[in-house]
Image (cartoon, rainbow, N blue to C red):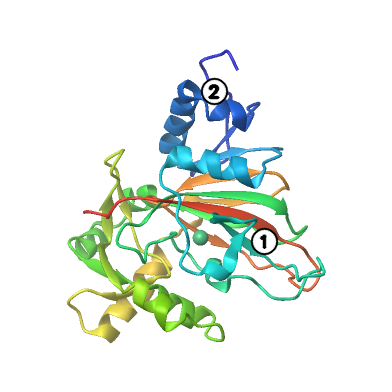
Amino acid sequence: MQNSELNLSPLSDALGVEIMDMAIEDAIAPHIFERVYAAFLKHHLILFNNIDLSPALQVEFAKKFGDVQVHVMNQYHGYGHPEIYLLTNLGEDGKPNGKHPDRGTMYWHTDGSWRKKTGHATMMYSEFVPTRGGQTHFCNMNKVFENLHKNTREKLSGLKAIHNLDFSRTRRHGEDPMTPEQRAEVPPVAHPIIRIHPETNLKSIFLGDHAEAIEGWDYDVGRNFIEEISAEITPEEYVYKHQWQPKQIAIWDNRCLLHRATPYDTEIEKRVMRRCTINGDQPYG
Ligand SMILES: [Fe+2]
């Protein structure tokens, strides 16, 4: 690629851009990656279409964005790369097994918010996608913040939510709980609900399904408050709904987006996604 301009095509009014006509081998070249990263910061989500991506190249590309997380739930590691978290509903025979690999992903959340240093970016590569459902929805939490009613903004100001993977995991699929060792590795952690983006300085609402309680509040009062606020902060107008095609790469900014997957027929349809999560910073407000 000789041209200094990227060929970009917007995905929605809310967020997201497709980077057209680019091989990943080119995208990782330093002078081009700079522009790819600028598009990521500006649009919050970048998409590449029709890419043959080996697991090794995926990890190499993910590492351009920062440190790649080795997930605590090690039963999901894929292809011999501990940086790849495999989301699949295929059994050992290669057929759909009727099980959703992670039902927690179907509720609005941001990856790694249960860590002290939360997720920076997530890279997802689609191998098999269902013909119906299995979408990923993204909500622009900076736009949500900017359009919040003044009273709600005041209510949230200065508050911290306690994020806890054990809480969200148990709540959404209690039949496969974390082991005591996994639990001990990721204790609950408090983060500001209004978060300043460390690179753009834009403010966003930082909540989602891992948020269990409000720091310093009675547990039940905090829980009700989180439920109430959560019901208001993903209005359709700030949401982009991505219908996956095979061989796509989406990379999104976890510091200013919430996302969720939609259900699909796990008995019939195949859905195999390879995910890398890039570690980020400790949120501040
Ligand atoms: Fe996620």
**Which quadrant is home to the N terminus?**
top right
Graded by Cα atoms within 10 Å as few (under 14), some (14 to 19) or many (20 or more), the crowding at tag 1 reads many
* Number of numbered discs on residues: 2
Left or right, 171 with respect to 201, comes to right
The percent coordinates of residue 230 (x first, y second) are 39, 68
Q: Nearer the viewer, residue 103 or 1?
A: 1
Point out the tag, 2 or 1, that comes first from the N-terminus: 2
How far apart are labels 2 and 1 at the CA level?
A: 29 Å
Q: Mark 2 falls on what kind of element?
A: loop
Inspect the image, locate mark 1, and give the three-letter code of the amino acid beneath it. Gly
Q: Is residue 28 above or below residue 132?
A: above
Residue 9 appearing in the image: yes
The quarter of the displayed image where residue 200 is located = top left
Mark number displayed over residue 134? 1
| Residue beneath the point at 76% across and 63% down | 270
Mark number displayed over residue 6? 2
The percent coordinates of residue 234 (x first, y second) are 45, 60
The percent coordinates of residue 115 (x first, y second) are 34, 63
| Residue beneath the point at 26% across and 84% down | 219
Inspect the image, locate mark 2, and give the three-letter code of the amino acid beneath it. Leu
Residue 13 appearing in the image: no
| Residue beneath the point at 43% across and 27% down | 34
The percent coordinates of residue 16 (x first, y second) are 52, 41
Q: Nearer the viewer, residue 261 or 59?
A: 59
Left or right, 208 with respect to 73, comes to left
